Image (tube, rainbow, N blue to C red):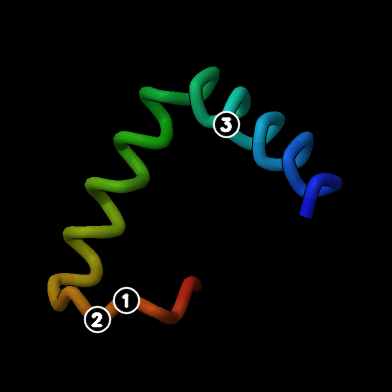
Amino acid sequence: MAQNVPKLALLFLVILSLQPLKTLTSVTFFITKSPPHGEHFE
C-alpha cells in the first residue's frame, strides 16, 4: 500500500493542475449521469 502513495500523490497533483478541466468534466459527468448510481466509468 505504501507503493500506492506516490501514485495517489501524483494523481492528486495532476488533478490540481487540471482543476478547471476536472470541474468541467465532473459537471458534464453529472449532467450525463443524472442518477447517483454511477459505478460504471465510461
State which tag comes first along the sequence, 2 or 3.
3
Q: Position of residue 39 (x, y in %)?
A: 39, 79
Q: Position of residue 19 (x, y in %)?
A: 41, 24
Compared to 38, does 29 lie above or below? above
Q: Nearer the viewer, residue 7 or 34?
A: 7
Within 10 angstroms of label 1, few (less than 14), some, or many (20 or more) residues? few
Q: Is residue 17 left or right of residue 32?
A: right
Q: Is residue 38 left or right of residue 42?
A: left
User: Element under label 3?
Assistant: helix
Q: Which residue is mark 3?
A: 12
Q: Position of residue 5 (x, y in %)?
A: 73, 40
- Image quadrant holding the N terminus, namely bottom right
- Residue at 77% from the left image edge and 48% from the top image edge: 4
Q: Which residue is mark 2?
A: 37
Q: CA–CA distance between discs 3 and 1?
A: 21 Å
Q: Amino acid at mark 1?
A: Gly
Q: Position of residue 25 (x, y in %)?
A: 36, 45
Compared to 10, does 39 lie above or below? below
Q: Are marks 1 and 2 in contact (CB under 8 Å)?
A: yes
Q: Which residue is mark 1?
A: 38
State which tag comes first along the sequence, 3 or 1.
3
